[in-house]
């Protein structure tokens, strides 16, 4: 039996190597998406079976006799022993955001291969390890947050840097995902109507739950979902109505202003009225769509139309500038390794783990599933014809604003596409135009619609599926925007409370309004900057977001490395030091190039200099663009300083521990024997 | 199959905070009422939305 097991796992590992080899070595022919699915699934299975088991047994020494915080501190609220698979789903729902969907779509400009390999290898050796180790560390420390652990394990500087980083990431994240929504909805009455309709639907759900059917969240979500589906159907009629279509046809700047106003109002409104009901709805829709996409890909098994590598590996890509190294690894964060996950792994999840061994499927396993979502997004992007993919994702400032100019430029790159191809596609999905829809969401929606329509219905239903996918993306992005603004407001109130006591009170309305306005103004500024950017905004904002997210991952890995060092000395340092060294190299290189590259498309300062030397340098618009480019350079520089600070501080601690001049005290909660009965496990 | 369906329902109830509400009633020895739900959900949502949502 044991021999059979060994043979089986040898076959799975062999299949992983074979499939990875097949997708890596294939050139010149279209490959079927099933190769990517198999390569990912077999690699994840091998990584989970061997690597995570090694970490769990040898490094963490997970012990089911040891009572977890969920048992010791059980209070019926946060601390509650929870079924392993329920917690797995709960944790996955918490870590799955728009990042693993949008990042791979953007990185597909290099071809399918670089992003796919990074997603698989990055998740198995980096992302899942980070999530698992931080979850373990927090579980052994009564569910402490990353900031608290950074303060305790590294020092006060580490804690402060972690807080500052989270605040800065929030601002850049909110701006960039709002830009994704703006670019998906601009000039789209169908999409705008559907998303606008989700707001009264959410308010109806809020009232339903509070006054009419208290506690019936699932029932209410089913009604909400039915209403949203009705809104998608009604959206087609709105788009075809001579009277209503102009009302819902908004320019990018009008949409940006609408989202900014919405963000401010939503963060100041009671959570039960809008945010919470929409969050319930978006969570269920998110899980359902991920499942549908997985089934759809397995059922349709589409061929990838994008090549393994495109010509843009040389750094001249139209979607964002920069070579594969480091920009592929910055663009795809959440599907491979994401610092934000460390906040979730040290948030609710460690307080709900029943047995220590559950940390492995929940921490390591959930990240592998998230990585698989990124693979599905990559497939959805790559099933589009390359010409269509680049026409949708390239900004007018690069390929030309007029359709004829855009298709001429894209065709000259070797990706043939015609104006009539794009017009027919836009008509099929009920849009006026699909040119220059930067941000990734529309091309992902097109890919998903393509896959869903092939499961049944064909071209007749592609418009519905396109708008269903847009609704799905916009729904949970807007939820992140109002929840993120609220969290940013809390952080700011916490900070300002040291200067003025009333400002720190979350119940003092003038303080709530002032701090909400400040947070909204911060991300709103970057959003408007992105909308006005002739290069499409994504070119500057997405790398900033990627760098900041990877920086947070570097902080989490510094904390994890310190903990492993205290537990075992230098023996197992390679487990966290390898991804840490990679991330630091990537983050530093990317940040350095974004600031100092002499290429105006890549370097912020070079871009500012080019604008300053142009004939229109003295106009207000160009002056604003120059200021924005320099501001982005400063933001990037701050990220570099933060990375360097936390890294140097950590290295100082590590050297002290290795030399024996610093106490290597592990700050774990003391061992308490678990009293949980078998039926509670 | 029925175990899987039960597990899925339990997951949905957890995500919908319905399980947490049941635990809250059990922990405090209270019965369900509209006022109790409002008290629970205000406390739950305050904590829930004080944390960052993942990207």
Image (cartoon, coloured by chain):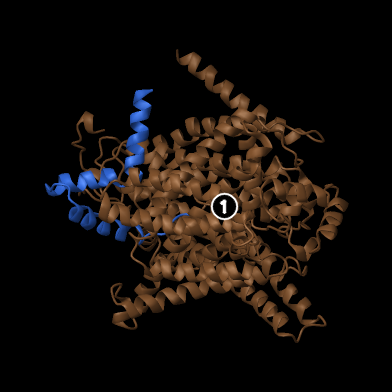
Chain colours: A brown, B blue
Q: Nearer the viewer, residue A665 or A396?
A: A396
Q: x and y percent of residue A57 in the render?
A: 39, 35
Picture quarter with the C terminus of chain A: top left
Residue at point 48%, 53% (across, down): A476
Q: Quadrant of residue B7?
A: top left
Q: Nearer the viewer, residue A108 or A7?
A: A108
Task: Judge left or right: residue A273 versus residue A477.
Answer: left
Q: x and y percent of residue A49 in the render?
A: 48, 30
Q: Residue furthest bottom?
A: A618
Q: Is residue A294 visible?
A: yes
Task: Judge left or right: residue A59 versus residue A352.
Answer: right
| Helix, strand or loop for disc 1 | helix
Task: Judge left or right: residue A674 versus residue A459.
Answer: left
Q: Residue furthest left?
A: B29
Q: x and y percent of residue A471 in the render?
A: 54, 51
Picture quarter with the N terminus of chain A: top left
Residue at point 47%, 67% (across, down): A262
Image vertical order of residue A625 relative to residue A328, above or below:
below
Label 1: which residue? A235
Q: Is residue A61 visible?
A: no
């Amino acid at each position: 039996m044991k021999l059979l097991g060994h043979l089986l796992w040898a076959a799975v590992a062999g299949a992983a190597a074979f499939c990875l080899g097949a997708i890596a070595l294939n050139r010149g022919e279209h490959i079927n998406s099933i190769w990517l699915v198999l390569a990912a699934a077999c690699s994840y299975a091998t990584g989970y079976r061997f690597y995570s088991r090694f970490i769990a047994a040898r490094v963490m020494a997970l012990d089911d006799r040891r009572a977890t915080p969920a048992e010791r501190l059980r209070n019926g609220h946060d601390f509650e022993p929870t079924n392993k698979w329920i917690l797995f789903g709960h944790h996955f729902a918490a870590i799955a955001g728009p990042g693993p969907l949008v990042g791979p779509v953007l990185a597909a400009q290099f071809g399918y291969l670089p992003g796919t390999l990074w997603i698989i290898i990055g998740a198995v050796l980096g992302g899942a390890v980070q999530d698992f180790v931080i979850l373990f560390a927090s579980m052994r420390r009564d569910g402490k947050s990353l900031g608290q652990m950074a303060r305790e394990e590294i020092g006060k500087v580490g804690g402060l840097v972690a807080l500052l980083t989270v605040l800065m990431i929030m601002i850049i994240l909110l701006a960039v995902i709002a830009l994704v929504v703006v670019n998906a909805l601009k000039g789209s009455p169908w999409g705008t109507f559907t998303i606008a309709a989700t707001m009264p639907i959410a308010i109806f759900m809020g009232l339903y739950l509070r006054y009419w059917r208290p506690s019936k969240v699932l029932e209410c979500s089913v009604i909400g979902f039915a209403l949203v589906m009705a809104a998608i159907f009604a959206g087609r009629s709105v788009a075809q109505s001579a009277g209503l279509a102009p009302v819902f046809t908004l320019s990018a700047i009008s949409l940006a202003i609408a989202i900014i106003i919405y963000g401010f109002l939503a963060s100041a409104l009671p959570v039960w009225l809008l945010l919470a009901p929409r969050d319930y709805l978006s969570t269920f829709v998110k899980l359902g769509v991920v499942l549908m996409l997985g089934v759809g890909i397995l059922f349709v098994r589409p061929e990838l139309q994008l090549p393994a590598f495109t010509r843009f590996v040389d750094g001249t890509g139209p979607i964002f500038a920069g070579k594969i190294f480091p920009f592929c690894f910055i663009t795809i964060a959440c599907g491979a390794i994401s610092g934000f996950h460390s906040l979730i792994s040290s948030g609710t999840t460690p307080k709900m783990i029943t047995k220590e061994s559950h940390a492995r499927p929940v921490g390591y396993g959930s990240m592998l599933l998230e990585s698989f979502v990124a693979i599905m997004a990559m497939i959805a992007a790559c099933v589009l014809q390359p010409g269509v993919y680049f026409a949708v994702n390239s900004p007018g400032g690069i390929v030309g604003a007029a359709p004829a100019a855009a298709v001429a430029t894209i065709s000259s790159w070797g990706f043939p596409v015609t104006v009539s191809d794009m017009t027919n596609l836009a008509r099929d999905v009920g849009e006026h135009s699909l040119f220059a829809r930067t941000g990734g969401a529309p091309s992902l929606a097109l890919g998903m619609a393509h896959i869903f329509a092939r499961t049944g219905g064909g071209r007749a239903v592609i418009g519905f599926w396109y708008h269903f996918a847009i609704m799905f993306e916009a729904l949970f992005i807007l939820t992140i925007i109002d929840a993120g603004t609220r969290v940013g407001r809390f952080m700011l109130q916490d900070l300002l409370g040291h200067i003025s006591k009333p400002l720190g009170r979350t119940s003092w309305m003038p303080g709530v309004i002032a701090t909400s306005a400040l947070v909204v103004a911060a991300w709103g500024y970057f959003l408007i900057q992105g909308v006005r950017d002739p290069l499409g905004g994504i070119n500057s904002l997405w790398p900033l977001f990627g760098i900041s997210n990877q920086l947070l991952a570097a902080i989490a890995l510094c904390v994890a490395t310190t903990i492993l060092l205290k537990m075992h000395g230098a023996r197992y340092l390679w487990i966290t030091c390898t991804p840490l060294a990679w991330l630091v190299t990537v983050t530093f290189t990317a940040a350095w190039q974004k600031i100092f590259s002499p290429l105006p498309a890549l370097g912020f300062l070079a871009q500012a200099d080019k604008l300053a030397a142009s004939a229109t340098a003295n106009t207000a618009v160009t002056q604003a663009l120059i200021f924005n480019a320099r501001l982005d350079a400063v933001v990037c520089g701050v990220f570099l300083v933060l990375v360097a600070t936390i890294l140097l501080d950590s290295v100082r601690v590590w050297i002290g521990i290795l030399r024996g001049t610093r106490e290597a005290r592990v700050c774990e909660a003391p061992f308490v024997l678990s009293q949980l009965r078998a039926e509670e496990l | 199959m029925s175990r899987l369906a039960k597990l899925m329902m339990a997951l949905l109830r957890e995500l919908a905070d319905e399980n947490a509400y049941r635990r809250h009633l059990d922990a405090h020895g209270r019965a369900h009422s509209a006022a109790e739900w409002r008290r629970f959900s205000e406390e739950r949502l305050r904590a829930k939305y004080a944390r960052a949502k993942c990207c």
